[in-house]
Image (cartoon, rainbow, N blue to C red):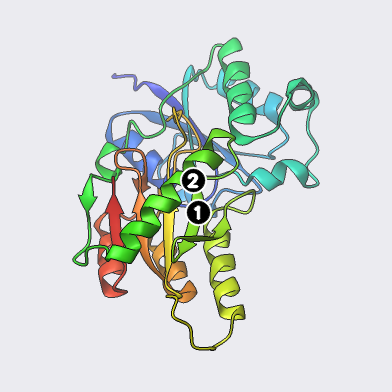
Amino acid sequence: MVVKPKLGLVAGNGRFPLLALDAARAQGFDVVVAAIKEETFPEIESHGAAAVYWLSLGELSKLIDTFKREGVRRAIMAGQVKHKQIFSNIKPDWRLAKLLLSLRTRNTDALLGAFAKVLADEGIILENSTSLLEPLLARPGVLTERTPTEQEKKNIGYGRAVACHLAQYDIGQTVVVAESACVAVEAMEGTDATIERAGQIMASLGGTPSTLSRALTVVKIAKPGQDMRFDVPVVGVKTIEIMRTAGASCLALDAGKCLLLDGNGIVEAANSAQICLVAD
């Protein structure tokens, strides 16, 4: 009898954990899922995991005990855990409380880096979350039928400069620009909410004629020295739908560091919406 290697999956929200689980199983792993009650989609139960355990975001000790009991020594994280959840009404166990008190800052890198160290100290190594899904990483170049306009190129250049400065401080990964002016930057709310807010800001300007374009360009980048074990930039068809509603016409990504969760589906959705999708 062949014994399959085990892989732990700490599952956040969105489709990323489902894709990671399917890919891990296809590569011969028995996957033990730690599903976060406050975040994970219920359909994780139907994707053939060896076991699914539902844990609260505050139950770090229970997560470690579960993986140890299941013989998990390697694990990945997939899916967003909203940063603002840390400041919600979760009840941290003693281990998570100790971790939080040890941090000088509570940005994403500090939180997840400390989480990875706690796991490593317990003999559970957190690995690159995109290693199973490399075909879904954005390839360089224009991915859609429509290429960026000259104004969109200017927006992208300006947006990347702003985003790089923000990313240095681990504030957010997304900047929304119009006419080389920053309309919205991402903080704790996440990319989709940032795009929606940018659309609302532009809509609030009313219908007064203007020489300035109201079309929005969305720039989403990886952090300098992005740790591919966690907090990897992801976009999907939902992102395109939100962009269309917000009046955004272009999406710029980091090639090789951003996951296209729907693969060709996101390109098709962008083409349908006449949105340019480009990766550099």
Mark 1 Cα shell of 10 Å, populated few (<14), some (14-19), many (≥20): many
Horizontal side, residue 170 vs residue 136: left or right: right
Q: Residue reaching furthest front?
A: 211
Asked whether residue 11 is in view, the answer is: no
Whether residues under marks 2 and 1 lie with C-beta atoms below 8 angstroms apart, the answer is: yes
Residue at horizontal 52%, vertical 63%? 195
Determine which of the numbered discs, if any, sits on residue 175 in the image. 1
Tell me the kind of residue under disc 1.
Val
Disc 2 residue type?
A: Ala
Q: Which residue carries the number 2 mark?
A: 163
CA gap between label 2 and label 1 equals: 6 Å
Q: Could you say which is closer to the camera, residue 37 or residue 104?
A: 104
Quadrant of the frame with the N terminus: top left
Where does residue 230 sit, x and y in percent of width and height? 49, 33
Residue lying at 65% horizontally and 43% vertically, measured from the top left: 83
Quarter of the image holding residue 258?
top left
Q: Which of the image's four quarters has the C terminus? A: top left
Query: In the rendering, at what x and y percent does residue 39 appear?
Result: 60, 49
